Amino acid sequence: MAYTTIDNPELYFQNKAYTGDGSSNQAITFDGSENMKPDWVWIKTRGAAHQHTLIDSTRGVNKALLSESNSTEDTDDQYGWLSSFNTNGFTTQDGSASDHWNVNKSGNTYISWNWVANGGTTSSDSNGSITSTVQANTTAGFSIVSYTGTGSNATVGHGLGSTPKILIVKNRDAAQNWLVYSSVLTGTSYLRLNLTNAKGTSSAVWNNTDPTSSVFTVGTDGAVNASSQNLIAYCFAEKKGYSKFGSYTGNGSSDGVYIHLGFSPSFIIAKRTDSSANWYMMTRKISDSGGGNPLDRPLFANDSQAENDGDNNVDFLSNGFKLRDSGSAQNGSGASYIYMAFAESPFVNSNGVPNNAR
């Protein structure tokens, strides 16, 4: 029996908290025992209302997107950039100007979430009707896919070799919403990462079609397939003991539901799907209790506000997470939610050895 496909999640995902120094180039080094060169870096200020900044090695260090906005890709240094992706972290740009406060203002606290794809090396994928540029890590189930829209129903190669359960897509050239596919909702529905809206239904988004092990399908909606415009997709396939993308139903109690993952989480994102609510983001070690449970300082992917102290309490456990808040945005009675979760460590490693309980 395989307990996990990845014994050391630090090779593929790490979160990193840091404090800005306002310098021209601050090197941020990960805390893990293993070197990890990131390909997708998502940064957010914790104590101030600055924007989420998302940068990847396919588009380049000087091209940023904002998760809470439908804005086009920044190529004029309006939001703050990186200087480089490093062998065990990344380097921020000058933090002295207000344009760069999203990534390195002196004295600001930040959290970054970091994923590995293929070290910045891309390849052409002609499996779909649209030829895409793909940077894939099949071990970790993550790929960065760049493609040009056609305006007509189409398929796009994702390079994972297994079926993705989550797609996050953004039109880089136009003010369009971020659209999210979840296998829980199927290809008939979608969510918008930059908005609180409940799930929407439209054949124009995913053409009522779920992804396969080689391609995902896009319809005619300009947010996923505008003619002659550049788009980026972040694709996730589930890997046992490392990542899980599923759903839960709330119980409306402070003694909330438990969600089994098969690993101790490092980071989760979750969203209510049947009603308006924030995309709440919880990261290990960020809490009023000095890093222990409950974690009680969420950030919201759809909002630039600072950490929301005291709400959306969650326990991160050795094999999953448990809700400790009765609020409707996280745990409404009978309400439906989806989640994305990434591991700090598997509950049991590939040799059958359990990790320490939490």
Image (cartoon, rainbow, N blue to C red):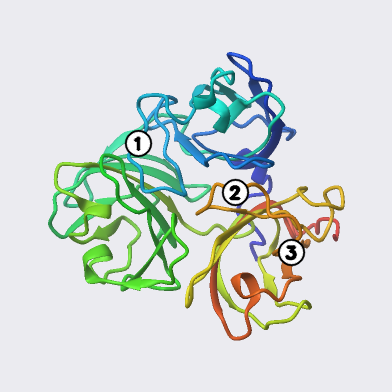
The structure residue drawn at horizontal position 59% and vertical position 86%, both measured from the top left corner, is 334
Closer-to-camera residue (75/188): 75
Q: Quadrant of residue 56?
A: top left
Residue occupying the point 84% across, 54% down: 292
- Residue 181, given in percent of the width and then of the height, sits at 39, 63
Which residue of the protein is positioned furthest toward the bottom in this rendering? Answer: 334
Mark positioned earlier in the residue sequence (3 or 2): 2
Q: Quadrant of residue 294?
A: bottom right
Q: Secondary structure at mark 2?
A: loop
Percent coordinates x, y for residue 322 in the rendering = 74, 70
Return the x and y of residue 112 as percentages of the image width and height.
61, 38
| Mark in front: 1 vs 3 | 1
Q: Residues within 10 Å of mark 2 (few under 14, many from 20)?
A: some
Q: Secondary structure at mark 1?
A: loop
Where residue 73 is drawn, which disc sits there? 1
Mark positioned earlier in the residue sequence (2 or 1): 1
Residue designated by label 2: 305
